[in-house]
Amino acid sequence: MKVRIIKDHEKKSIYKQMIKKIYSKDQTFKNNKEGLFALVCNPKGVFYKKSKQVMITVSVEKDLHCQGVLICHEQQPKVLYLAFFEAIMEAKESVEHLLSYAEAYGKTLGCDKLVIGIDGHCNNGLGFLTIGSGHPSFGEAYNPDYYADFFKTFEGHTFVSYKDEVQSIAPRVLHLRSKLHLRMAPYTLEAADFSRKGLRASLKRYTDLNNNIFTDHSYYFRRDYDEDVELFKSMMPLLDHQNLLFVKKDGKDIGFILWYPDFNELVKSSRGAGIRTFLQYRLLKRNPKTIKIVEIGVEAKYRGTPAIFILFNGVMEAAEKASQHLISSWIHGDNSASRQITSRFAQKPYREYVTYEKKI
């Protein structure tokens, strides 16, 4: 059994080789993985430069069994993430070697916790899929069922998402809209400006709100402006201004919602979103039937006000025109308030994801 540290110039090819080995016969697989890997693990990238990273593989007689990228970001110096994990089914012993290496490496950095199932940051990807079927939506986690078996001794954290038909959600929204009509008056909704001149200013608003709103999220750490610009630039060919909406009161941003169509509906099996997806969406006007709410939040002071509903209503006004289904973002299983609000509109449990932790 051989543990190997992968050099920068080999990373992409090794990861691509592993993806092919695990998913080549899986007709449901849509490749969200390689594009994100290239972003997070790019030595020239902003996120990479603010983190310590090492890619590890474990092989048995030259047969690649498992691999992962160990990431420690400067904003969470006590936490080591095992990101981009992939393994063959027969890799139990090899995975144990990988985990042992990860713990030892974490200790050299002064880390006291190992987290598995987050690709560097929870905005990038969260959890292993444990319940749910069908192709992954754009940006959604996907993996073989047996991955959970490797981490049975770890502490698991469950996240859930919901899905429903737009035609079922619309009457519920209309009913609440009529009830909240007068209370909605002090609030305004404003779309982002994703033009070349407006992009950085809009993303600064987004980053500031993230850093104000999600401080109590179990995996959140303070975002950097340049990191968010880097993340969004990879998606800009597919995003419209209305995909990021801000809610304001007295001229001040108090919340936001990020959503987009499920571009993976335009992607063939084993492929990832790219130029072909852009051409289908922009030039051929092929609209996915599903939209996905990626993030939604308001500042603590305005929770319980119509602000959340105004953001959701803004998405529904766009969704009702072209979409048939809506998927919610993932919500921590213990976050009863968010689950209650979400299930009020999208009432059908959709998928479950789990992250794993261990003290080191």
Image (spheres, rainbow, N blue to C red):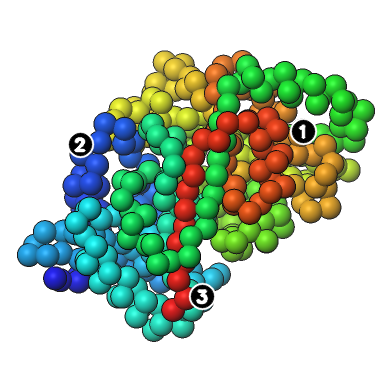
Q: Residues within 10 Å of mark 3 (few under 14, many from 20)?
A: some
**Residue at x-position 15% and y-position 71%:** 2
Q: Position of residue 225 (x, y in %)?
A: 59, 57
Amino acid marked by disc 2: Lys
Q: Residues within 10 Å of mark 2 (few under 14, many from 20)?
A: few
Position of the N terminus, as image quadrant, is bottom left
**Residue at x-position 49% and y-position 20%:** 289
Do callouts 3 and 1 mark residues in contact (Cβ within 8 Å)? Answer: no
Given the current orientation, which residue lies at the most extreme left position?
A: 61
Instruction: Specify which label sits upstream in the sequence, 3 or 1.
Output: 3
Looking at the image, is 14 positioned above or below residue 109? Answer: above
The numbered disc on residue 25 is 2
Horizontal side, residue 152 vs residue 76: left or right = left
Q: Position of residue 59 (x, y in %)?
A: 15, 64
Residue 151 can be seen in this image: yes
Horizontal side, residue 235 vs residue 188: left or right = left
Q: CA distance from mark 3 to mark 2?
A: 39 Å
- Residue for badge 3: 77
Q: CA distance from mark 3 to mark 1?
A: 37 Å
Amino acid marked by disc 1: Ile
- Residue for badge 1: 310
Do callouts 3 and 2 mark residues in contact (Cβ within 8 Å)? Answer: no
Looking at the image, is 12 positioned above or below residue 241? Answer: below
From the image, state whether disc 1 or disc 2 is nearer to you.
Answer: 2
Position of the C terminus, as image quadrant, is bottom left
Q: Position of residue 279 (x, y in %)?
A: 39, 23
